[in-house]
Image (cartoon, grey):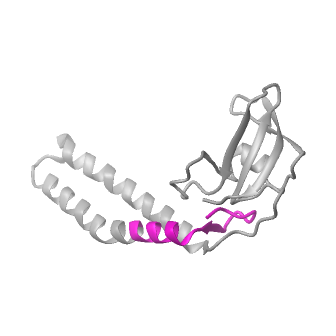
């Protein structure tokens, strides 16, 4: 379901693994055949320098090949099942509640792989700046991380419980 503290392992539910495997099988089989046919049809239209259909098909082919590589990497390093979790300690597969310094509003999210879609709450990657800063912290701890604009943000961990689905 989620990524572990080891950067190269991605924990996935059986459902997510099956969905990603099915997508990979489609893209590397029928998906490649379909895009090859589009490229060939566009090629037959004539001058490739001014052929928008050809260039669009080649761009789509590049995106498909990129997604195939991404899926292969995820599935090669996937472990199916539940990630090891300890109540009260932030880690992948945990529902985390934090409060940002200077703000009274609590924010609750799932710390998990972005490939784990369908969660009824927001999903933050353990590799994101916030996810990396709070990973391994305990309830009551504070963590500071850098924002894209260079400023720092501090959060306090209020709760960390295993995600129940």
Report the side of 67 relative to 101 (left or right): left
Does residue 9 belong to the magenta stretch? Answer: yes
Q: Quadrant of residue 25?
A: bottom left
Does residue 7 belong to the magenta stretch? Answer: yes
The foreground one among 56 and 7 is 7
**Residue at position x 27%, y 69% in the image:** 30
**Residue at position x 34%, y 68% in the image:** 26
Q: Examine the rendered structure and indicate whether residue 99 appears above or below residue 56.
A: above
Q: What stretch of residues is rendered in magenta?
A: 1-23
Q: Quadrant of residue 106?
A: top right
**Residue at position x 79%, y 47% in the image:** 133
x then y, percent, for residue 112: 64, 56
Q: What is the number of callouts on the image?
A: 0
User: Which residue is outermost to the left?
Assistant: 45
x then y, percent, for residue 103: 78, 26
Report the side of 33 relative to 77 (left or right): left
User: Which residue is outermost to the top?
Assistant: 102
**Residue at position x 23%, y 63% in the image:** 34
x then y, percent, for residue 116: 55, 58
Quadrant housing the N terminus: bottom right
The foreground one among 74 and 1 is 1
Q: Quadrant of residue 6?
A: bottom right
x then y, percent, for residue 18: 46, 71
User: Which residue is outermost to the front?
Assistant: 164
The foreground one among 49 and 131 is 131
Quadrant housing the C terminus: bottom right
């Amino acid at each position: 379901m989620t990524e572990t503290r080891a950067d190269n392992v991605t924990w996935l539910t059986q459902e997510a693994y099956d969905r990603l495997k099915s997508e990979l099988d489609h893209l590397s089989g029928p998906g490649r055949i379909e895009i090859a046919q589009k490229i060939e049809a566009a090629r037959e239209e004539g001058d490739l320098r001014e052929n928008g259909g050809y260039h669009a098909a080649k761009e789509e082919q590049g995106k498909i090949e990129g997604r195939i590589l991404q899926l292969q990497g995820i599935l090669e390093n996937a472990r199916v099942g539940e990630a090891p979790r300890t109540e009260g300690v932030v880690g992948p597969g945990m529902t985390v509640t934090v409060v940002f310094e200077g703000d009274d509003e609590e924010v609750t999210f799932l710390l998990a792989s972005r490939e784990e879609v369908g969660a009824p709450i927001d999903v933050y990657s353990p590799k994101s700046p916030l996810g990396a800063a709070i990973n391994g912290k305990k309830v009551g701890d504070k963590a500071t991380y850098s924002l894209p604009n260079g400023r720092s943000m501090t959060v306090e961990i209020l709760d960390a419980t295993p995600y129940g689905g």
